[in-house]
Image: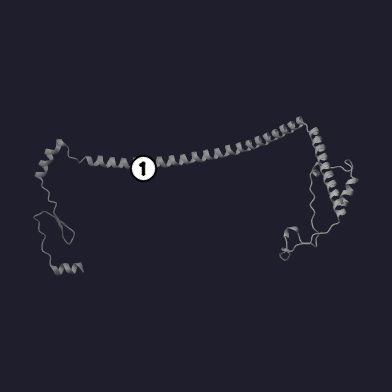
């Protein structure tokens, strides 16, 4: 502490250039390397140890207190002086117009970058929109072809059904033809009962009785 106070005696305010970053700087003293670090804490063997109170002569105590008070007063004075001095210099050097110009320049630069980015995104967006439109048109054309093909197939099927119905309608019995058809059916009775012989011949008539077939002959023919 004495060494520090002696250095303050020869220190002038204009002796060394002091920047604004050195105002309000607190110096932290660290222990020597052979000692353990400060953040390790107290050792377990020394937790309950009570260090003996140092016996300092009264004259030395008074001198230490005087030097400490002087050091604290001078340090506060220098700190306040440097703070006020450099704050005033900064306030004098501050140019409102210059800061406004810098702000406007920065704003214009940001707007330019934003416009460039928007232009790039517009090109990409339009290209993507064109691709999506072409894809949608292509899908619509394919769907249209599929729909037309299904419609043609459906119309063809309906035409076939209509043609068959028209063809079969030629044999329909109309109301004015009903009496004649009844008389024709009564005049020409049809017997739908029939039988098949071994040769595959069809024997019509309810009254027709096929000739008897020998079982031995039928068995030999089947084998």
Q: How many marks?
A: 1
| Of residues 132 and 168, the one drawn nearer to the viewer in this rendering | 132
Q: Is residue 169 above or below residue 6?
A: above
Callout 1 secondary element: helix
| Of residues 140 and 169, the one drawn nearer to the viewer in this rendering | 140
Residue 217: quarter of image = bottom left
The residue beneath circle 1 is 153
| Of residues 139 and 182, the one drawn nearer to the viewer in this rendering | 139
For image coordinates 83% across by 47% down, the residue present is 69
State the image coordinates of residue 30 (x, y, percent, origin top left): 79, 56
Q: Is residue 192 left or right of residue 74?
A: left
Quarter of the C terminus within the rendering: bottom left
Q: Is residue 90 left or right of residue 136?
A: right
For image coordinates 85% across by 53% down, the residue present is 61
State the image coordinates of residue 57 (x, y, percent, origin top left): 86, 56
Q: Is residue 158 above or below residue 50?
A: above
Residue 103: quarter of image = top right
For image coordinates 38% across by 42% down, the residue present is 150
Q: Is residue 161 above or below residue 43?
A: above
State the image coordinates of residue 159 (x, y, percent, origin top left): 31, 40
């Amino acid at each position: 502490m004495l060494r520090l106070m002696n250095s303050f005696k020869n220190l002038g305010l204009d002796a060394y250039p002091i920047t604004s970053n050195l105002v309000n700087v607190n110096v932290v003293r660290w222990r020597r390397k052979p000692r353990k670090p400060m953040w390790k804490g107290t050792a377990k063997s020394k937790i309950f140890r009570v260090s003996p109170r140092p016996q300092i002569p009264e004259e030395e105590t008074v001198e230490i207190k005087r030097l400490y008070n002087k050091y604290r007063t001078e340090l506060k004075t220098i700190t306040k002086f440097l703070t006020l001095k450099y704050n005033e210099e900064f306030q004098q050097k501050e140019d409102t117009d210059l800061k406004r110009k810098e702000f406007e320049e920065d704003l214009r630069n940001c707007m330019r970058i934003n416009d460039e980015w928007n232009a790039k995104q517009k090109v990409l967006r339009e290209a993507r929109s064109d691709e999506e439109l072409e894809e949608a048109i292509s899908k619509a054309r394919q769907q249209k072809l599929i729909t037309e093909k299904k419609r043609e197939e459906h119309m063809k099927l309906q035409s076939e059904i209509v043609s068959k119905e028209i063809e079969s309608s030629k044999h329909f019995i109309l109301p004015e033809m009903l009496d004649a058809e009844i008389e024709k059916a009564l005049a020409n009775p049809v017997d739908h009962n029939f039988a098949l012989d071994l040769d595959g011949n069809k024997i019509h008539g309810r009254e027709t009785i096929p000739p008897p077939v020998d079982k031995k002959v039928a068995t030999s023919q089947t084998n």
